[in-house]
Structures are given as structure tokens and as C-alpha cells.
Amino acid sequence: MSIKAEHNKLRKYISAIFESIGLSREYADIIADNLVTAEMRGIRSHGLVQVKNYVDLYNKGTYNKAPKVRIIKEDAATALIDADRGAGAPIGKYAVDKAIEKAKAVGISAVSVRDATHFGMAAYYAAEAAEKGCIGFAFTNTPPLVAPYNGCKKEMGTNPICAAFPSSSGRPLIFDAATSETAFNKLFFARKEGLSIPFGWAVDGSGRPTTDPAEAIDNGALLPYGGYKGYGLAFVIELLTGILSASVINDDGETFPTKQDTIGFFFIVIDISRFIDTALFAKAADSFAERLLSSAKAGDERIYLPGEKEYLNYDDAVQNGVEIYSRTAAELRILGDDLGLDMGFDEILV
């Protein structure tokens, strides 16, 4: 069972939840936009299912409601930012905006963030760079959720990689994926909604494949995508995020497991105009995409570009409303009632 909500009203409702627990309006608005955009794109694991999770982490003090964000190191092309356990989405946006500014000035930039929290959907950040005529890369680590190749215990994060490129349509071409078989939050979503998970996503505590999300979460682990290839990519991203930012190392260079408030981000932005004309790049990218779309099909299903299905989901949500599954909807309604929001949950429905 599910219901549907009008997307702009939904953003206001979610923002009001975070503002009511003590976050600034600016931070609350960005978190709400991040989560609702993910839900509209069909990335439910990084969408509304996270609202109560975030609220609980703020109320427990794991996440910092009023962080003192500071720049530790900075030059013309790079920066290292301390997030002070603050909201991942607003601080991630601040970091990628800084990376874009630097890339426009010097051609290519890299910005690292340490001691941060969950930043939601990686495409939220890389796409912003692409919309401004750049190529954007966004990386993050996570607490241990994935077994190493041939292992069965949580040792690595899902460590997603995202790349976004300008196109002539104005909508960036985006690849955004975890380096595990799936995002951990898809297990979190499946457990919350009482669903099973596909065979091959995860193992139980003994290393046996399981379709029970609770067993995978409590005792087992996710598997790396593509075996040793996903394992290798996750390893690289851990070095770029957790270790390069110094989020998960001590003064002696020893590492410790990433916690929910010691997450690292890494953003790379490239100004295309330093290489070729930006409009020419976008036109050529579209030409390449069209060649793929018109390629011979192996079966009945059409060929899609990376990220294309997410745009189709987004457009449907704008036109017909954002679908919210029943248990997530019940959580949002209860949160609003408990916090005494001026806007009632029923007011956002279509």
C-alpha cells in the first residue's frame, strides 16, 4: 500500500520536521530537498525512509544540530573541511560549491570533508557541477556494511561513486552507484516495509546467501558488486574519503572503522572549457548517448542511459505525486503530530 504527496508541499513538511528539532531553516531546507529529490528519482533507500533515522540520530546527539564547520586547509585548487558531525547534505553542498568555484578559477579542483554524516544521494552534488558546465565526481565512505571479497563480515562501506556530465538537454548525464551489490539503505527500506531482498545481495553471519534483510543487517553483510571489482573500487574510495580526509585515522596513521559521525566526502570538479568548448562537449555527449540508445537490443526491453530511469521517475512524481510507502508514511505522520507541526500530513497529499 502507498499514498502520494505533492512534491513541494512534501519538501516543506520534511523541512519543518528538521527545523522543529533545532536545525537552522537553511540546513532543514537542504536536507528536505536532498531526501525528497532522492525519493522522486526512485532512490527510496536515500529518501524519506531516512527522515526518522536522521531525527533519532540528532536527538541522540550522534549528529550535531549546530556544527562549527571550518576550513582546515585551503589553496587555489583544494580544500579540507571539518564538518564537526553536522548535516551531510548542507555541508556536502557547501563543499561541492567550493569545488565548482575553484575549478572555474584554476581548471580542476578537489575538496575533502571529514567528520561528516550521511550525505544522501551522491548525484545531488555531482549534478550541480554538471549543471554549471563542469564534470563532477562525488564519493563518500560509510560505516562498515560490506564484506571483503571472499569474506562474510562487515569491514567496508558501500562507498558509492558518482560522475555527472553536461548535456545539451540541460539535464546532466549521471552515473551513481554503490560499490556493493546494492545500497545498504535498500536493506533498511526492505526491513522497514516488510519486504525480502534479492538472492545475491547479502550473506548471513555464516556467509550463506540470504533474502532476509534483517538477518543481513543484524548478523551478516552486503556483498561487493561484481566480486573483486567492486571490492577494489570500494577500497580505493575508502582511501580517497575516510583516509585522505583523516576521518578514520589517528596521529600514528592507524585506521579505525568509520562511524556515523566520522564519514568522509571527496569531490572533484573539472572545468570542461579548459579542454574543449563546453557546448561542443555537451553536443558530443548527447551524440554518443543517442548512438547507444539506437543500438540493437538484445531483447524486448529498450536501452536506457545511466540515470535515465531516475529522470523518468522524477518527471512522474512531479506530474502525479510522490509515492510514499505505507510504513514510511505512517512514520512521517507520527513525527509531524509528535512535533506539533503547523502543517498536517494530510495537507501534503494529492
Image: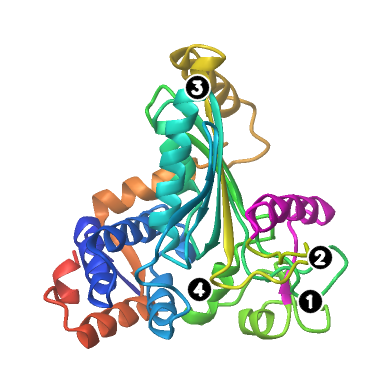
Compared with 100, 291 (above or below) is: above
Q: CA distance from mark 1 to mark 4?
A: 21 Å
Between disc 1 and disc 4, the foreground one is 1
93 magenta-colored: no
- Residue to which mark 3 is pinned: 286
Residue 152 seen in render: yes
Left or right: where 323 falls relative to 239: left
> Which of the 4 image quarters holds residue 220?
bottom right
Badge 4: few (under 14), some or many (20 or more) residues near its Cα, within 10 Å?
A: many
Identify the disc placed on residue 71: none
Q: Position of residue 193 (x, y in %)?
A: 47, 79
Q: Mark 3 and mark 1 in contact (Cβ < 8 Å)?
A: no
- Residue to which mark 4 is pinned: 189
Could you say whether the residue bearing mark 2 is in a helix, strand or loop?
A: loop
Q: CA distance from mark 2 to mark 1?
A: 8 Å
Q: CA distance from mark 1 to mark 3?
A: 42 Å
Residue at left offset 41%, top offset 74%: 54
Magenta-highlighted residues: 221-246
Identify the disc placed on residue 148: 2
Residue 305 seen in render: no
> Which of the 4 image quarters holds residue 181?
bottom right
- Which residue is nearer to you in this view: 342 or 257? 257
